[in-house]
Image (spheres, grey):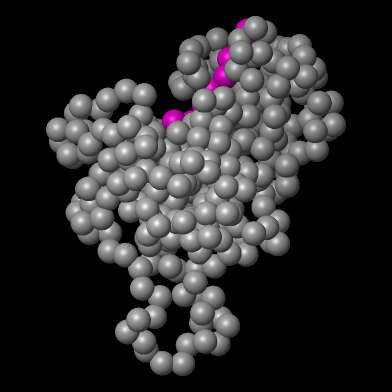
Amino acid sequence: MNKPHAVITRRIAPEAVHLLQQHASVWQWNASDPVPRAILLERIGEADALLALLTERVDDELLAAAPRLRIVANMAVGYDNVDVAAARRRSVIVTNTPGVLTETSAEFALALIMAATRRLKEAMRWVERGHWTAWDPLLLLGIDLTGATLGLVGYGRIAAAVARRAHALGMRVLYHARSRHIEDEERLGVEYAELPSLLALSDVVSLHVPLSRETYHLIGESELRLMKRSAFLVNTARGGVIDPDALVRALRESTIAGAALDVTEPEPLTADHPLVQLDNCLVVPHIASASIATRTRMATLAVENIIAVLSRRAPLTPVL
Ligand code: DGY
């Protein structure tokens, strides 16, 4: 019997590719740049399974070009790049990779919180530009996290993992989400707040909502105005959650103190983009889950979902 056919859209952990090759014939775009759309549209025609990344738009056009397709395994916890309704209409299962990247992403959110509040980018530029002449008691002063208030917008697995770390640092933690998390309120002392008061009270606002019609540009001009002038904004969710023009204005006019962005709109940003150029804005290239172990686990989980579906078993982590 012919093996089913799978398409992998990028270079990923080789262990995961080898695992998939035991169950399917595999075509892979084995490069570090995204597969050109035209090539993907051509290759998807024969595919029973697609391992996609967040850089691929899995929309009706792509699904229509894939008459045999049974599963889209997105190698990310977020799946705003996939038209889930269109997949459902065509009985294509969609899976993501929740759980395996939680701690790694939370660690990175904390790294950005620390980098922003201690003005790491400015400090590095200061040295690189040759300005470091003497120790200065008033040079590059930031804020202490101990005793500061962290506002988490969204409270999924990653936000909860950030809350645990922030709690250990002695921060007060506020959160805003669609539902209450009573257990964490009791265990960690996290406090529910409506978005406007969370923005007004927090020293650091960290975003953890998925991108959807409801969360697109959730943080715009008026929300930024609610934040303290001394506050920092951190985004490890999706770039589209922030209105970038409003953020540029807020950073230029110092209506907030700074930002640290793992994700941006658009993505990638060019080196001459104001958010990249500004001293009070740290931008990194969407790497919150980028540890060796976690990226391997994400690829393996995506492959395990494909193997399950191709073997007519239930997927491990379907998108509900
Ligand atoms: C995700 O999983 O959604 C991240 O953005 C990449 O790890």
Picture layout, residue 3 above or below residue 155: above
From this view, report whether residue 269 is shown above or below residue 3.
Answer: below
The residue most toward the left is 186
Q: Is residue 294 visible?
A: no
Q: Which quarter of the rendered picture does the N terminus lie within? A: top right
Residue appearing at x 57%, y 54% in the figure? 249
Q: Which range of residues does the magenta coloring cover?
A: 91-98
User: Can I make out residue 48 in this image?
Assistant: yes
In the image: residue 5, left or right of residue 160: right
Whether residue 95 appears in magenta in the rendering, the answer is yes
In the image, residue 111 lies at what x, y percent?
Answer: 40, 57
Residue 296 covered by magenta stretch: no
Q: Position of residue 163 (x, y in %)?
A: 28, 43
Toward the bottom, the furthest residue is: 133
The residue located at (32%, 39%) in the rendering is 197
> Residue 217 at what x, y percent from top left?
55, 36
| Left or right of 69, for residue 125 | left
What residue lies at 50% left-to-right and 12% top-to-bottom?
A: 313
Q: At 74% across and 32% down in the image, what residue appears?
A: 27
The residue lying toward the viewer, choosing from 317 and 251, is: 251
Main secondary-structure element of the magenta-colored stretch: loop
* Residue 247 position in % (x across, y down): 55, 50
Q: Number of marks in the image?
A: 0
- The image quadrant that residue 62 belongs to is top right
